[in-house]
Every structure is written in structure tokens, then in C-alpha cells.
Amino acid sequence: AQTVTQSQPEMSVQEAETVTLSCTYDTSESNYYLFWYKQPPSRQMILVIRQEAYKQQNATENRFSVNFQKAAKSFSLKISDSQLGDTAMYFCAFMKLFGWGSNFGNEKLTFGTGTRLTIIP
Amino acid sequence: DVKVTQSSRYLVKRTGEKVFLECVQDMDHENMFWYRQDPGLGLRLIYFSYDVKMKEKGDIPEGYSVSREKKERFSLILESASTNQTSMYLCASAPTRLQETQYFGPGTRLLVL
């Protein structure tokens, strides 16, 4: 079974600063995806960024980037130029690929326990 | 845009009641999921479904059942609600394609008294 660990329950940073959220995972799989999800207060969970394990290049999405270290099983999220709207719970998640009959489909997501990030004005 | 809706944002029920949580998605996704979210525990998968009338147990299925009679609708049922089922319940859907993620509903916060 896969496990995902987020060791920082809470973090806070001044607006415009850079912050890094850590995530480690444990798996014996070689093909998988890693995700960072954001859940703003009282709002819907949305995908921030996704990384395919077979890609060595780190994924980036505007101010969000990851540091994916496959050998170390580490997947940290860096938020640059943080904004007040970045205040949210952030969840790291793991998904392995599997076959379902003749189709490859989504395997279930395994989530970490989350990091509550507060951006201070 | 993908839209996943849940029938209630907040729900208060009494111990022993039968509770139905409804989830509807409008993107013709094959896969649907029910999670519960608790502080310090993250999201844990209760049940999922890869097709109509098909269901699979997740990590914590005890005390729950599900129904998927139509592709767009996935219901979570608490046969006899208990106080330890007080939680936030999140529904998600996803297409059967590689490199896809899951799309989440807004959640239902259930309080069992």
C-alpha cells in the first residue's frame, strides 16, 4: 500500500514571499502520478499541479512548481510570490496506474494529511 | 468546465437515521469516488465506482454503502448514522483516461447528533 506524508500541519508566510511545502511518499510502484491539491476555506478542492513519475523534468504552473526527487520519494511544492488567495489547505496525493479489463483507468488517490497554509498580509 | 455537485452543503442528522448523500457530475465521467475528510487524517476513500451498477470498497467502507444506478449519479448511504460518521464528505469524478485527475464537489458537512 502507498503512504503519503506531509510533515508540516501548518505554515504561514508573508505575502510576496516564497514558501515550500514538503511531501514524501512510499511506494514500490514505478509508474504513478503525484498531485498537489488546494482547498481554500469553504471552497472546492482544485488541482494545483501534477507530475508524472516517468518525467524527470519538474512540473511548473505559473507561480507553482514542484521539486520531484524520485529516488528520495520526495515531492515538494514551491509557491513563489505568494498571494492572499493562496491561503488554503494543501494536500499531496499519489495515484498509481492500473489496468481495468482492457482499459487503463484512474486508480484511487492516496492523500497526505494536509498542510494549512496562511498568507499574511 | 467539469461540474460536480453535491445535494447538501450542511446536514444534521440523528443517531440511527438513514442518510443519503447525493453526487452528480455533468461530464459523462466513468469513475466516481466518495471520500471523507477529517482534521489530521486528510482524505480517505470510502467507495468508488468505475461504471454504472459497479462499486468497489475503498479504505474505510464500514458503515457505508453506495448506489450507482445512472452514470452521472453516485449516492453514499449511511444505513444507520453514528456520531463517528460526523465528517466532511467529498465526492469526485474522473474520466477513464490516462493522465487525468479527479474533480471534486464542494463537499457535504455532516453532523450526527
Image (cartoon, grey):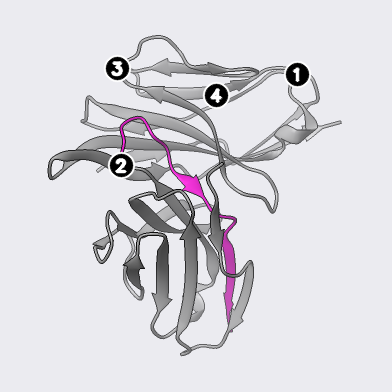
Marks 2 and 1 belong to one chain: no
> Looking at the picture, does residue A52 appear above or below residue B94?
above
Magenta-colored stretch includes residue B9: no
In the picture, the quarter occupied by the N terminus of chain B is top right
Q: Which residue is mark 1?
A: A17
Residue type pointed to by label 1? Glu
Q: Amino acid at mark 2?
A: Thr
The residue that label 4 is drawn on is: A77
| Label 2 vs label 4, nearer the camera | 2
Nearer the camera: disc 3 or disc 2: 2
Q: Position of residue B109 (x, y in %)?
A: 60, 67
Q: Nearer the viewer, mark 2 or mark 1?
A: 2
Q: Chain of mark 1?
A: A
Name the residue nearer the viewer: A17 or A56. A56
- Chain for mark 2? B
Chain to which mark 3 belongs: A
Magenta span dominant secondary structure: loop
- The mark nearer the N terminus, 3 or 4, is 3
Closer to the chain start, of discs 1 and 3, is 1
- Residue A92 x/y as whole percent: 48, 36
Mark 3 or mark 4, whichever is nearer to me: 3
For the record, the magenta segment spans B96-113
Determine the image quadrant of residue B100: top left
Q: In the rendered view, does A114 fall on the left or right side of A120?
A: left
